Image (cartoon, helix red, strand yellow):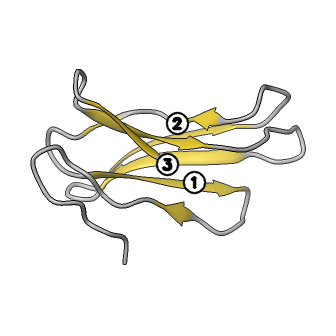
């Protein structure tokens, strides 16, 4: 999922699911226009669900990507407060 905060003009990813010492959850906010990235990851015993790092939407749309270790990537649409949603290709 992609979350957005109007008060800080930023978007970040959120993964619903368990955490474990047996795998690493990777979440990256990515700004398409300038290829800026805010990566994060977690591995260990913790309550379920994981938050990623935030990335500003002031200079372009932001999308979230998430994956477990070398598994397939899930990608959200790219969103900015003043423009249309751009779907991943």
Cα gap from disc 1 to disc 2, whole angstroms: 9 Å
The residue singled out by tag 2 in the image is: 52
Going 56% across and 63% down the picture, which residue do you hit?
74
Q: Circles 1 and 2: CB distance less than 8 Å?
A: yes
- Quadrant (top left/top right/bottom left/bottom right) for the C terminus: bottom left
- Residue 21, quarter of the rendered image: top right
The mark that comes first in sequence, 1 or 2, is 2
Report crowding for label 2: few under 14, some 14 to 19, many 20 or more residues within 10 A (C-alpha): many
* In the image, residue 46 above or below residue 65: above
Along the viewing direction, whichever of 73 and 17 lies nearer the viewer = 17
User: Residue 32, percent across and down?
Assistant: 27, 59
The residue singled out by tag 1 in the image is: 66
Going 59% across and 65% down the picture, which residue do you hit?
73
Q: Circles 3 and 1: CB distance less than 8 Å?
A: no
Report crowding for label 3: few under 14, some 14 to 19, many 20 or more residues within 10 A (C-alpha): some
Mark 2 or mark 3, which is nearer to you? 3
Mark 3 or mark 1, which is nearer to you? 3
Going 73% across and 44% down the picture, which residue do you hit?
17
Going 16% across and 60% down the picture, which residue do you hit?
84
Task: Spot the residue most to the top.
Answer: 7
Which mark, residue 1? Answer: 3
């Amino acid at each position: 999922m992609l979350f957005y905060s109007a008060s800080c003009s930023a978007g970040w990813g959120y993964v619903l699911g368990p955490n474990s010492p047996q795998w690493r959850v990777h979440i990256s906010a990515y700004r398409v226009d300038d290829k800026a990235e805010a990566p994060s990851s977690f591995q260990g015993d913790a309550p379920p669900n994981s938050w990623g790092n935030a990335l500003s939407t002031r200079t372009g749309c932001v999308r979230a990507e998430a994956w477990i270790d070398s598994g397939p990537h899930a990608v959200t649409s790219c969103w900015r407060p003043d423009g249309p949603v751009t779907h991943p290709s």
